[in-house]
Amino acid sequence: MLTLASKLKRDEGVKTGRPPGGPSDSSHRVSIRDRLLIKEVAELEANLPSTCKASFPDENKLHHFQLAVSPDEGYYQSGTFHFEIDVPEAYNMVPPKVKCQTRIWHPNIAETGEICLSLLREHSIDGTGWAPTRTLKDVVWGLNSLFTDLLNFDDPLNIDAAEHHLRDKVTKPTKLVWDQTVVDMSDWIHCDASPTILQA
């Protein structure tokens, strides 16, 4: 029995020169992703925040790149934080996968690198999660904002870091001890162990 779906598939194969039963839809989806990424990477490079730098280890693989964020204000000023971004084959129906490569004491970034940013959620209750209308530019601007206006203490991923930040706002500034070295709050950036908190 000939169905409309199989006829359309056969007709598409004739138009593109692919035989029926040829490459899977998954490989076709990769090419759609790659076409989107060519446009989005150009847009991203034209609109990159001054505090961010994107690098592509392999120029032929736009679906895998690194981002360095160097905040120029706030708690994390003068630090540099590295993120690895992988764009899955099902993009733009699903969000990119992002991991922080720099160990950091941050309420919205776990010490293992997971990130709590609503636009990276595939399914979000509040409606601010991923949508096919979002782009890589939105992801980069969101990651950049994690160090300024999107610093979220109400829904933290790292509860200890959030409590520490909130406690510090109420009391006098604290100092942290990492690897037997006392550092100021502004040096929270490179944490090799859980910090020990000392009152200043």
Image (spheres, rainbow, N blue to C red):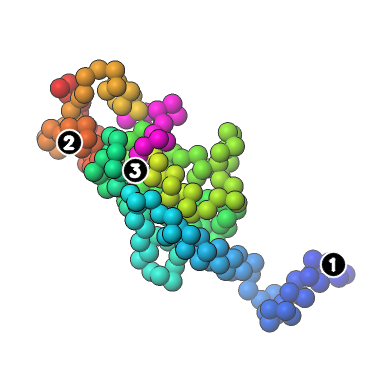
Which quarter of the picture shows residue 192? Answer: top left
- Element type at marker 1? loop
Instruction: Give the SS element for disc 3.
Output: loop
The residues bearing labels 3 and 1 have C-alpha atoms spaced at a distance of: 50 Å
Q: Which residue was labeled with disc 3?
A: 112
Q: Earlier in the sequence, mark 3 or mark 1?
A: 1
The answer to whether 167 appears left or right of 117 in the picture is left
Of the numbered discs 1 and 2, the one sitting upstream in the chain is 1
Q: Any magenta on residue 88?
A: no
Please identify the dominant SS of the magenta region.
loop
Mark found first going from the N terminus, 2 or 3: 3
In the picture, the quarter occupied by the C terminus is top left
> Residue 2: where, in percent of width, then height?
86, 70
Which amino acid is tagged 3? Thr
Instruction: Give the x, y percent position of residue 198.
Output: 17, 24
| Residue 130 visible from this viewpoint | yes
Marks 1 & 2, CB-CB < 8 Å contact: no
Q: Which residues are magenta?
A: 147-161
Residue at 15% over, 34% down? 183
Residue 84, given in percent of the width and then of the height, sits at 38, 54
Residue occupying image coordinates x 46% and y 40%: 117
